[in-house]
Amino acid sequence: MPADDRASGSRAADSTKMGNGKAAAHDTAAAGRQAAARESAAGSTAARREGGTAAGAGLVVTGAGKVYASRHRGEPPVTALRDVSLTVAPGAAVGLVGASGSGKSTLARLITGLDRPSTGLITFGGLRVDRLRRGALREFRKHVQMVFQDPYAALNPLHTVGYTLARPVANYLGLGGSQLTERVRDLLATVGLTPAGQFEDKLPHQLSGGQRQRVVIAHALASEPQLIVADEPVSMLDVSLRAGVLRLLNQLRRDHRVGLLYITHDLLSARLVTDDLLVLNAGRVVERGPTRQVLRQPADPYTRRLLAALPNPFADSHPAAAHPFAAGSHPVPARPAALRPAGPSPAAAPLPQSSPASPDGGPA
C-alpha cells in the first residue's frame, strides 16, 4: 500500500476514534443528567412516601446535641448543644432566647439541614432531617426556609429585587413567564413593598434597611414554606424599623399558617411575636413555657439575669417598674410625675403618614 494511502487511513481511523469518544462522552453526560433527575425525583417521592407531604407538618426536635472537634491538637471537643428538645406546630411561634454563644444559631443550622446533629433526632413531617439526601433535601428546603440576621449580607448586591425573588419561585414552584412575574409581585405585596413595580428593578443598595429585610422575608416565602427559622431577624435594624418587621412576621403566621422559630437575644421582641419561649444557656434549655409566664415569673436564675439586663430608664426613679414584665405591671412603665411637664399637655401633632413606596420610612 502506498505511503499516502496508509497515512490517509490512519487519519481516518483517528478521526473515527475521536468521534466515537465525543459521542461516548456526550452519552455519559446525558446519562449522568438523567440519573441525577431520577435521583431528585426519587428523593421527592421518598419524602412524600415517608411523611406524606411536608405541608401541614410540624417540626420536632428530640434530644438534639452537637459536638465540634477541636481545631488544635490536645484540646477537648466543643459541645455546642446538649439534649435540646422542642416542637413547632403549624402556625405556632416558638421563641429561642439566650446570650451570644448559647447555641441558638447552631440549632438553627441543624433544623435547616445545614449541619447534622451529633446526637438526638430532628424530624419534619415524619422525615429524619439528618438522613435526607439530594432530591429529598431539596424537597425539605422547599418547606423550611431561613431568614438571616443581616439583610445587607443576605442579598446579592448585583441582583435586582425581582431577580432575587424570581429564582426560588422558578426553582421550587416551576413557574415561568407571566405567572412568574405575577408571583414575584404578589410576594412584594405580601411583605408590604407596594406598588411592586417600584421595587422590582431596584438593587439592594437602593433600599432602606427595613425594606431589605422585607425582601429577605419575601425570598423565604417564595417557595411557600411551612416553617420559617428567623435568626435574629431585626437585630441589624434601627429600632424605628423593628416594629414593622415584627408585625409582618405575626401577620404571615396568622394569614398563611406558617410556623415560626424566632431566635433572638431580645426578650422584648420575643414577647411580641411568640406563644412559647425556651431559654438556652451554654447549649442547654434551662427554662421553657408560655412566653408571658416565663417573662413574668422566671424560675431559672439565668432567665432572671436576662430580664435584669433589660434597659429601663425609669428603674431608679420608679422602683415599682424595675421589672417591666412583672405581673400586674404595664410593659412600658408610666413616666414618673417628676418628669412630666407642668400644666396641661399640649395637643400632639398628628404623625406624618408613610408613603406607600416606603413602608419602613426609608428611601424608596
Image: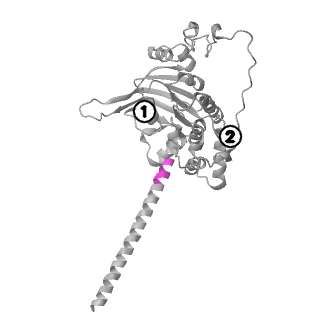
Taking the magenta stretch, the answer to whether it contains residue 42 is yes
The quarter holding residue 102 reads top left
Which segment is the magenta one?
A: 38-44
Q: Does the magenta stretch mainly form a helix, a strand or a loop?
A: helix
Q: Amino acid at mark 2?
A: Ala
Work out whether residue 48 or residue 310 is closer to the camera in this orientation and state it: 310
Residue of label 1:
106
Taking the magenta stretch, the answer to whether it contains residue 77 is no
Work out whether residue 189 or residue 346 is closer to the camera in this orientation and state it: 346
**Label 1 neighbourhood size at 10 Å, few (<14), some (14-19), many (20+)?**
some
Picture coordinates of residue 264, whole percent (x, y)? 51, 27
Q: Quadrant of the C terminus?
A: top right
Residue of label 2:
357
Q: Is residue 151 left or right of residue 282?
A: right
**In this picture, is 222 found above or below 249?**
below
Q: Tell me what residue is drawn at x 48 percent, y 51 percent.
A: 40
